[in-house]
Image (cartoon, rainbow, N blue to C red):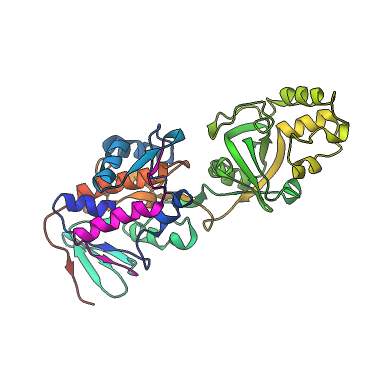
Amino acid sequence: MTAALSASNQGAKPLILEGAPRIGRKILASGNGRCNLVNMGEPRFYGDAALAGQVLKNCPVEAVLSFFHRLGLATVEEDGGRVYPGCGQAAAVLDVLRFELERRHIPIITESPALEIQKAGNLLRVKTRTAAYEAPCVIAACGGMAGGKLGHNGDAYSLLTRLGHRLIAPRPALTQLMGEKNAVKGLSGLRLPARLTLCSGNRPVSAAQGEVLFTDYGVSGVCAMQLSRDAEGLAKKGGAMLYIDFSPMLGLTDRIYDRVPAENPFANEEKVLACLKERQHILPKDALLCGLAPRLLAEKLRGLPVEKLAKMLSAFPVPITGVRGFENAQVTAGGIAGSEFFPDTLQSRKIPGLYAAGEILDVDGDCGGYNLLFAFASGLIAGKAAAKKGPLKEKGA
């Protein structure tokens, strides 16, 4: 949608082929229905992070916000640089895009997934189940495999791989972590402030802090999902261990809601032990956690010696067995190799007139608006660059 509007700004007459029955449904599901559309902080991307950096250099976050403000969207910035619609409804983002597409009479043909892109002389031909369309330029903005029915099943990648582009193996990212059941048994439904450190053996790999949610299969929450990109690879190799530090819950460290440096997961053990020994002066041994930790956690740790209890509260171990799949993921890691597209235009280095934007490329970011920011910015760049004179032509049914 942003690509089409950007192309229209240059005088082009775009047409949108939409595979789903309704356009923009994934926007409605973003940010728990609030749509965290951009982040004002430093870029935090993975995969082809260099491409993401060039895209945001050419179309910075201020330009993306200006685009939406000109469409009438009111926005508000919250903690961590996260920007949301002022009304708190993701539907407002979709509404302004759809209204502008309708106002400019840009056609949207729904339930028409592209099946193949072919070279046709100086044009490109896009084939669907019922028609073929020819145009000087085609923008592949098909998204990724994340989100179950809101994503695609991987077929969209073949549109570009058949033309010689390379696919970086897609993997679910920003998804829940699966752990050994005994480690989390009895804790399902518990939501606590904590610091999570993912380790490979004894080596800290990545860490995040926020609210962790225990489930019957492992752990969830934004802080856990931030680690899923690393956890997925480590779990396949074996030896992935998640340590959960409850010192933020105990009031011994600051409550932070972000990525944090990956450090020794046992760093706060002495603080926790000192806290517990202080409580020993006023509470019996079997009630040390009464009023300090929720009942489910207290029952799971009941009967441990104070030293062992301190170790468990500062570095509660959960062996990680894998991550939840694309059905539960917020974004796809991997995709079409970004190095095969010019960063200033996002035109293919292999096929003139072919462009790509958004999650179909090998770029993914952290929670907090980064993924939508890249999607919108890359769409604006590709649409502007792809705008050419000459009407799109339909070739029969």
From this viewpoint, which residue is outermost toward the bottom?
397
Q: Is residue 92 magenta?
A: yes
Residue at 63% over, 26% down = 253
Residue 57, image x and y in percent? 29, 34
The answer to which of 360 and 43 lies nearer the viewer is: 43
Residue 248, image x and y in percent? 64, 31
The answer to which of 14 and 189 lies nearer the viewer is: 189
Tell me: 217 left or right of 60: right
Task: Examine the rendered structure and indicate whether residue 119 appears above or below residue 6.
Answer: below
Residue at 24% over, 70% down = 132
Residue 252, image x and y in percent? 67, 26
Observer able to see residue 40: yes
Quadrant housing the C terminus: bottom left
The answer to which of 270 and 74 lies nearer the viewer is: 74
Which image quarter: residue 254?
top right
Residue at 13% over, 53% down = 11
Residue 204, image x and y in percent? 62, 32
Observer able to see residue 351: no
Tell me: 236 left or right of 295: left
Residue at 81% over, 23% down = 277
Q: Which residues are magenta?
A: 82-111
